[in-house]
Image (cartoon, grey):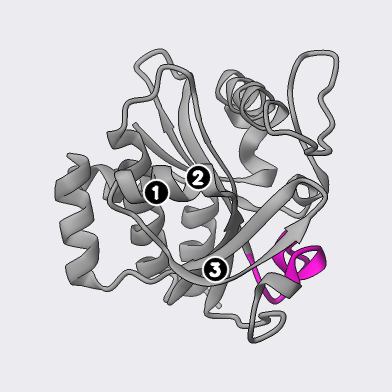
Amino acid sequence: MIRYISGTDLWLFPDLAHSMFRDRARQFFERPNWEIDVDRGGCERDQYDLLNPIYVVVDDDAGHHVGSMRLLPTTGSTAINDYFSRTLECGPIHDPMTWECTRFCLSPSAELQTVGKVFASAGRLMQEFNITSLIAIFDQLMLRRYRLSGVAPELLGDGDFSGGRVLSGRWQFNKMKLDVLMRHAGLDFLECELALANSPFYLENRLFSEYP
């Protein structure tokens, strides 16, 4: 199942949130020299989880995390601008039409198609909110995974940091690209529509837009 969840609505999905943060700890703790905080419950969170991001999540039939990413607008604080801007040849990006994707994470049980499902779901959200681009930082391991999954980004630059080589990239999805990605990932378009319709933050935004 696809879910779009704002940070302030995570409390509505306690089991899903816990399994997502636990999988994040497993994935990122294994990266050499990455400085992350893992709490006593085995969950990983950082300061950007406090900024009310949108989480794009794929879960299983039991409601447990399978794959996810975190989205934040570049008009506010983002990891790529705060810490990794020298990987951007054009300098920091502050653009309301460009959002940052971070903490892309897969559970140990995730299939290769899950990568495409998460990105296709994010692409549908971009389309709904008129966002033109997603940008992210990643390492060579993640770049290979993106390429194998058919979601290779456009590379924007790279740089050496204490944790090793870091790259930055951008994804842009028009309707044609999104349709191809959805088919490749085995994702039904209606599943994303239902996920949007059932998202508390989306319903709230629609309500306020209809009644100014």
Q: Which residue is mark 2?
A: 142
Quarter of the rendering containing residue 5: top right
Q: Is residue 21 left or right of residue 149?
A: right
Q: Amino acid at mark 1?
A: Tyr
Would you say residue 78 sits in the magenta stretch? yes
Q: Earlier in the sequence, mark 3 or mark 1?
A: 1
Q: Position of residue 127 (x, y in %)?
A: 35, 69
Q: Residue at x 16, y 58 (%)?
A: 180
Q: CA distance from mark 2 to mark 1?
A: 6 Å
Q: Which residue is mark 1?
A: 146
Would you say residue 31 sits in the magenta stretch? no
Disc 3 packing (10 Å; few <14; some 14–19; many ≥20): few
Kindly indicate whether the residue at mark 1 contacts the one at mark 2 (C-beta within 8 angstroms): yes
Q: Position of residue 85 (x, y in %)?
A: 74, 72
Question: Dot 1: what SS?
Answer: helix
Q: Is residue 134 above or below residue 41?
A: below
Q: Is residue 40 left or right of residue 8?
A: right
Q: Amino acid at mark 3?
A: Phe
Q: Amino acid at mark 2?
A: Met
Q: Residue at x 48, y 56 (%)?
A: 202
Q: Position of residue 105 (x, y in %)?
A: 54, 36
| Residue 41 vs residue 171, the one in the foreground | 171
Which quadrant of the rendered structure holds the C terminus?
bottom right
Q: Which residues are magenta?
A: 73-85
Mark sitting on residue 208:
3
